[in-house]
Image (cartoon, rainbow, N blue to C red):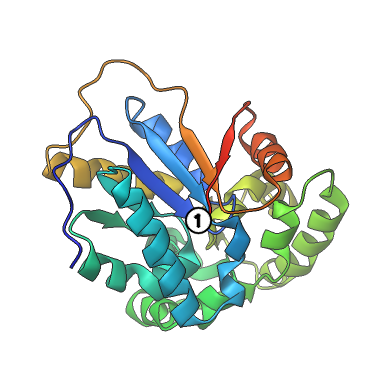
């Protein structure tokens, strides 16, 4: 196990994803814990993780987490369903700090569904993972699930510039089965999809409840920090967080991030 050095309550929280999707989790954490500093690490040079083998995902997740720990992070959030499915157990074995993962909100969706017809949008890797299969067996065995892998959706969101037509075409393709099955609850099983929530709601209508997990992750971060007495005591709000990427075109990555979170940021390039 890699033991953590002594950390202070005002140490930052690390958040990482293979790209920009984890920004939805970062925003939720900032809203829940406005006095916390956050380091956001976009491992863009290796994105998307879903196209890589289990061993590659574990290796990248380990390297990024180790880097964040070296920066003094008091907790690390794996803001990626794919990386959580592949690497969360390994990370928790190797690092002696709070490691918070993310998984599709299948349990609350089944509990809230009146018709027991639940839809799930996720990456191909996530829906094929053993972790997801166990989730279905544990919480959705008696529900009628419509599980839809969404290849291309993450990649479209990661592109710079205007690509609404491409996103709309993909959404129509992936949401039509949900309409046909008349689901009343839809799970967003990828952090990227949170940025498409309004478009998805518009297509399916207000009668369909959409569940994503950034808020739940933010609450778990609070709980873990409270357990360790590591909630920041600083009364200032940190409006400036650190944004890092392994990608080569920092200008393009910055433009994509700014378009999603609607604020001006600066990004540091990390050679990993």
Between 8 and 168, the one lying in front of the other is 8
Residue most extreme to the top: 236
- Quadrant assignment, res 230: top left
The image position of residue 227, as x and y in percent, is: 12, 44
Between 215 and 4, the one lying in front of the other is 4
Q: Is residue 209 above or below residue 127?
A: above
Residue 95 in sight: yes
Residue most extreme to the front: 271
In the figure, is residue 218 to the left or right of 150?
Answer: left
The image position of residue 14, as x and y in percent, is: 37, 46
In the figure, is residue 256 to the left or right of 15?
Answer: right
Between 261 and 212, the one lying in front of the other is 261
The image position of residue 170, as x and y in percent, is: 78, 63
Residue 141 in sight: no
Name the residue at 37% across, 66% down.
Answer: 62
Q: How many marks?
A: 1
Between 86 and 190, the one lying in front of the other is 86
Q: Is residue 50 above or below residue 262?
A: below
Q: Quadrant of the N terminus?
A: bottom left
In the figure, is residue 251 to the left or right of 238?
Answer: right
Q: Categorize mark 1 by other alpha carbons within 10 Å: few (<14), some (14-19), many (20+).
A: many
In the figure, is residue 213 to the left or right of 49?
Answer: left
The image position of residue 124, as x and y in percent, is: 60, 76
- Quadrant assignment, res 6: top left
Q: Secondary structure at mark 1?
A: strand
Residue at label 1?
Answer: 17
Q: Is residue 198 above or below residue 93?
A: above
Name the residue at 36% across, 57% down.
Answer: 65
Name the residue at 23% across, 61% down.
Answer: 95
- Quadrant assignment, res 97: bottom left
């Amino acid at each position: 196990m890699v033991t953590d050095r002594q950390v202070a309550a005002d140490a930052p929280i690390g958040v990482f994803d293979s790209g920009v999707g984890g920004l939805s989790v970062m925003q939720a954490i900032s809203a829940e814990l406005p006095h916390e500093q956050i380091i956001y690490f976009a491992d863009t040079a290796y994105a998307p993780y879903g196209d890589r083998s289990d061993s590659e995902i574990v290796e990248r997740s380990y390297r990024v987490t180790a880097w964040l720990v070296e920066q003094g992070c008091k907790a690390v959030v794996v803001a990626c369903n794919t990386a959580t499915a592949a690497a969360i157990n390994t990370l928790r074995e190797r690092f002696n700090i709070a490691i918070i993962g993310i998984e599709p909100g299948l349990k609350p969706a089944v509990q809230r569904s009146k018709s027991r017809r639940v839809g799930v949008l996720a990456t191909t890797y996530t829906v094929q993972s053993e972790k997801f299969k166990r989730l279905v067996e544990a919480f959705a065995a008696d529900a009628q699930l419509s599980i839809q892998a969404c290849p291309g959706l993450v990649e479209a969101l990661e592109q710079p510039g205007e690509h609404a037509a491409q996103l709309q075409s993909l959404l129509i393709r992936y949401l039509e089965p949900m309409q046909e099955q008349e689901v009343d609850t839809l799970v967003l099983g990828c952090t990227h999809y949170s940025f498409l929530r309004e478009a998805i709601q518009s297509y399916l209508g207000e009668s369909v409840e959409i569940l994503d997990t950034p808020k739940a992750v933010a609450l778990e971060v609070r709980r873990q920090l409270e357990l360790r007495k590591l909630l920041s005591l600083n009364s200032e709000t940190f409006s400036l967080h650190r944004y890092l990427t392994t990608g080569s075109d920092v200008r393009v990555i910055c433009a994509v991030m700014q378009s999603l979170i609607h604020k001006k940021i600066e990004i540091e390039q990390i050679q990993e």
